[in-house]
Amino acid sequence: MTDPASAGTGARDPDALIARAGLRGDPNRDQHFLVDDRVLDRLPGYLPEGTDASHLLEVGAGTGALTDRLLAVADRVTAVERDPRLAAFLREEFAGEIDAGRLTVIEGDALDVDLPADATASVSNLPYGVSSEIAFRLLPTGTPLVLMFQREFAERMAAEPGTPEYGRLSVTAGHYADVAVVEPVPRGAFDPAPAVESAVVRAVPRDPDYAVPDDEFFLRFVTAAFTQRRKTMRNAIRNTAHISKLDDPKAVVAAADEALMGKRAGEVTPAEFAHLSRLAWEVGDPAERE
Ligand SMILES: C[S@@+](CC[C@H](N)C(=O)[O-])C[C@H]1O[C@@H](n2cnc3c(N)ncnc32)[C@H](O)[C@@H]1O
């Protein structure tokens, strides 16, 4: 049997893991395994200083190259993997760690399975097909996250108002955390190489520096406005009542600041969105208030 520990770092060699698993990553199943040791070694280090690493969560564990790095820094790791062949391989490859109570493998879809409520942080190379849904399962947990996304998606998540990338994703992700792109990752770091570039995002949880009347309403109000991002806020609010579920969007426009109503959604800051959502909650007759 191949020695699981590669020389030097003591970490398992990613290519050897793929060889032992005996399968090729299937892009149709979002299987792009990280094979660049330097990227793998850096990922846990992107967790904010002082992060409680007693129980790390990994979504989409694949052949376990990142799982192995997480086990090196955590007391305990929970790894979720949907592909039964990979889950079986992980149970075999990491039998020692599982027996020692340091690793739990959950076989299933990360969108359906119960994620451990006591995970203290997550480090994951996400399946890109469902990365948005998974991110928005993890962000409300209020734990630090280090997540690999498609680069374009990562940049939209971290974008500032007034930039072309700024949008619904920036405001909604920023509602839960300070989000930053910490490392672009080239296609060649993966096997098989994905069609697009990737990037690592760090999300540090925090309460927003503004108040909203209701999280769900705020997120819906923002989503509605960005469906009409070329229109002024005045028109966007009027035209999207079917999404924001406001009974009286005109009252919101009438009560709001003229200059703000003349801006486009891409120029409206999260705090301004929050202000507008409070106004809409008061005078726009949203569905929840009935
Ligand atoms: C980009 S690969 C990352 C694998 C490994 N962590 C690495 O870095 O090499 C994503 C992994 O997520 C798994 N996966 C795809 N969809 C999933 C889902 N809905 N829930 C859980 N795992 C999923 C794939 O089988 C694949 O192993």
Image: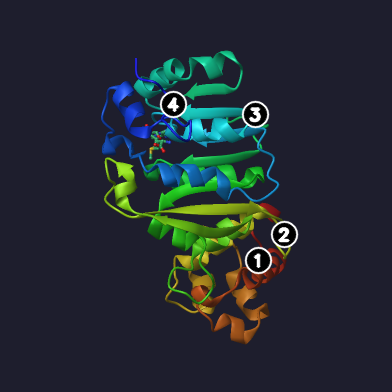
Q: Quadrant of ligand 1?
A: top left
Query: Up-down: is 65 above or below 38?
Result: above
Q: Residue at label 2?
A: 213
Circles 4 and 2 in contact, beta carbons < 8 Å: no
Numbered circle sitting on residue 5? 4
Q: Is mark 4 within 8 Å of ligand 1?
A: no
Image quadrant in which you'd find residue 3:
top left
State the residue position of label 3: 75
Please give the name of the residue rendered at 56% of the width and 30% of the height, measured from the top-left corner.
Answer: 71
Instruction: Give the labeled residue for mark 1.
Output: 277
Residue 220 seen from this side = no
Q: Earlier in the sequence, mark 4 or mark 1?
A: 4
Q: Amino acid at mark 3?
A: Asp
Disc 4/disc 1 C-alpha distance (Å): 54 Å
* Residue most extreme to the bottom: 259
Kindly report which numbered mark, 2 or 3, lies closer to the viewer in this rendering: 3
Q: Nearer the viewer, mark 4 or mark 1?
A: 4
Residue 125: x %, y % from top left: 44, 42
Identify the residue at image location x=61%, y=77%.
253
Circle 3 Cα neighbour tier, 10 Å, few/some/many (<14 / 14–19 / ≥20): some
Q: Is residue 2 left or right of residue 169?
A: left
Image-based side of 81 in relation to 74, left or right: left
**Is residue 193 shown left or right of residue 69?**
left
Vertical comparison of 274 with 258: above or below? above
